[in-house]
Amino acid sequence: MLFGFTFYQIAAYFLIYSCLGWCVEVAWAAVRRGVLVNRGFLNGPVCPIYGFGMLALLFALTPIADNSLLLFAGGVVIPSAIELAGGWLLYRLYHTRWWDYTDRPFNLGGYICLEYSLYWGLGSVFILKLVHPTFAALVDAAPAAAGWAVMAALYLVYAADVAVTAVAAAGLAEELDAIERIADGIHAVSDAMTGLIGSTAMDADQKLDESRLQLKLAGAELRTAGEKLSARELRQAVREARAKADEAMDAARDRAADSLRLARLRAELEARSGLLRRQLQAQGRGGLFGAGRLLRAFPRLRHGRRGLSLEHLRRLLWGDDTD
């Protein structure tokens, strides 16, 4: 027993409310955006944060279930605390805010806001008063042996989904990080070249004319390669892009670097930017699993220390950022 519940009940409630929470998220997105999309962080029809949240509500609020005012207050505080902790943990793991409330009043770090906290309070009263008694009766009525067998199979699938999604999210975060670094590298190289042009313009023009064909060929090779990358090759391309962006930043800081080296770096960064741009486009258009699904599920995600939105990252990648 734990907080008055058997382990069988706890395991069953976690699965039930993870799935119910996913249904709520999908319905909410359908109403607001007019499209059906898998709004869960995982690939399957589950949202673990709802499972954890409901268990926390049951553990803490069952003794005061007859007091609607206290249920509402607890429903505001407990789910908000879990949402805050979950958002912070995901950010620490992937440097990405998968949901963001910074445009809403009375928000805390963009992870939670007063409006949705009040929704959690109302929803908690509704669930605990009207919905949970039905599910509790169904769980208690089911044969325990059959219930454990079904849940064992479901938890195995759940665990596999967590592992697959963790890999996909890490890969997407690495791609978004590469996009940000490439954009910063291009801007830094451009600024450094501007500072050098005054004293070395003629020499730089001559060297650039000599290497122009080589740079075009290198860019063409990257564009061709980007059309047929395997998952493993994409990860390698992302790592190489990040390394090249870091090299560009170092070169831009080195005022002794000549214009030719900076020009070569910029041309290569722009070619790699095109590769990642096409990859991001392809991911956003298709795929029921992996990074593409995450992009569609969380269109308001923000990445990196600066909290850049997905749209901002796209503008950086296209080279038309105006900030």
Image: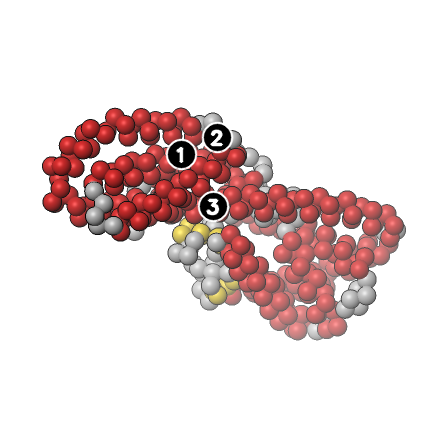
Above or below 4: residue 43: above
Q: Label 3 amino acid? A: Glu
Depth check: give the residue in front, 222 or 158: 222
Residue under the point 48% across and 52% down = 96
Depth check: give the residue in front, 130 or 100: 100
Image position, residue 273 (x, y; %): 36, 38
Residue to which mark 2 is pinned: 229
Looking at marks 1 and 2 on the same chain, the residue that comes earlier in the sequence is marked by 2
Image position, residue 234 (x, y; %): 48, 35
Packing grade of label 1 (10 A; few <14, some 14-19, many >=20) is many
What's the distance in space between the residues labelled 3 and 2, CA to CA? 16 Å
Location of residue 131 (image quadrant): bottom right
Depth check: give the residue in front, 98 or 240: 240
What's the distance in space between the residues labelled 1 and 3, CA to CA? 15 Å
Packing grade of label 2 (10 A; few <14, some 14-19, many >=20) is some
Query: In terms of secondary structure, where does tag 2 sit?
Result: loop
Name the image quarter holding the N terminus.
bottom right
Q: Label 2 amino acid? A: Leu
Looking at marks 3 and 2 on the same chain, the residue that comes earlier in the sequence is marked by 3
Residue to which mark 1 is pinned: 275
Image position, residue 301 (x, y; %): 47, 50
Residue under the point 63% across and 56% down = 49
Above or below 183: residue 93: below
Q: Residue 86, labelled with which disc? A: none
Q: Label 1 amino acid? A: Leu
Residue to which mark 3 is pinned: 174
Query: In terms of secondary structure, where does tag 1 sit?
Result: helix
Mark 1 vs 2: CB contact within 8 A: yes
Packing grade of label 3 (10 A; few <14, some 14-19, many >=20) is some
Looking at marks 1 and 3 on the same chain, the residue that comes earlier in the sequence is marked by 3
What's the distance in space between the residues labelled 1 and 2, CA to CA? 10 Å
Location of residue 204 (image quadrant): top left
